Image (tube, helix red, strand yellow):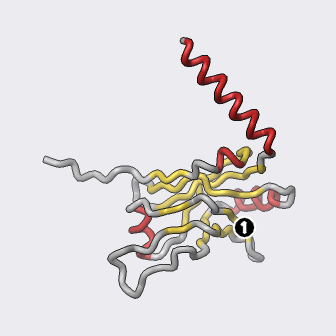
């Protein structure tokens, strides 16, 4: 008999660790429309170019995250590149808003679905890496690989 438990949804932004240094991480809820959660469960999400901004009311919004339209959806299907609201505590929002003025950015790291069925987006307060920082990271990764190979 087959086990009907679905595979856990864990969609990662692999390019983010190459381009940014992470200073703090937060888990935020997402406000989604009906067919969006079905596309998320089908793992049809692209986080590569995503970023977050604050509006004039102090709400946090995620931009450029593509959730593909649900294929069996009808005319009620969602817009793939829609701007989505993120849900955080007021204290966390104040912390992030205070850091945004210093030239830092907020980027999505991974999208996952909790045991209760809620879609959560892990976001990070990040600082962009320069070219020499990327080279140093690659050099450290190569050295670590060499050490593991000799063990």
Read off the residue under disc 1: 53
Q: Residue furthest top?
A: 151
Which quadrant would the C terminus be assigned to in this image? top right
Q: Position of residue 44 (x, y in %)?
A: 44, 63
> Is residue 122 rendered to the left or right of residue 113?
right
* Residue at x-position 36% and y-position 84%: 74
In depth, the one of 112 and 12 nearer the eye is 12
> Is residue 120 rendered to the left or right of residue 55?
left
Q: Position of residue 36 (x, y in %)?
A: 45, 71
Q: Position of residue 71 (x, y in %)?
A: 36, 74
* Residue at x-position 78% and y-position 39%: 133
Is 105 situated above or below 57?
Answer: above
In depth, the one of 8 and 92 nearer the eye is 8
Q: Residue furthest left?
A: 1
* Residue at x-position 65% and y-position 45%: 17
Tag 1 secondary structure: strand
Q: Residue furthest right?
A: 102
Is 58 situated above or below 9?
Answer: below
CA neighbours of label 1 inside 10 A, class few (<14), some (14 to 19), many (20+): some
Q: Position of residue 118 (x, y in %)?
A: 45, 61
């Amino acid at each position: 008999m087959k086990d009907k438990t679905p595979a856990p949804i864990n969609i990662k932004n692999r390019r983010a660790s190459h381009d940014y240094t992470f200073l703090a991480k937060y888990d935020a809820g997402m406000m989604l429309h009906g067919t969006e959660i079905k596309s998320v469960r089908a793992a049809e999400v692209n986080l590569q170019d995503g970023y977050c901004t604050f509006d004039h009311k102090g709400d946090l919004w995620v931009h450029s995250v593509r959730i593909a339209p649900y294929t069996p959806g009808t005319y009620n299907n969602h817009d793939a590149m829609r701007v989505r609201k993120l849900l955080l505590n007021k204290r966390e929002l104040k912390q992030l808003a205070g850091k945004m003025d210093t030239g830092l950015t907020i980027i999505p790291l991974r999208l996952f679905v909790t045991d209760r069925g809620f879609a959560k987006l892990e976001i990070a307060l990040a600082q962009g890496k320069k070219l020499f920082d990327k080279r140093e990271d690659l050099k450290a990764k190569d050295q670590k690989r060499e050490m593991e190979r000799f063990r």
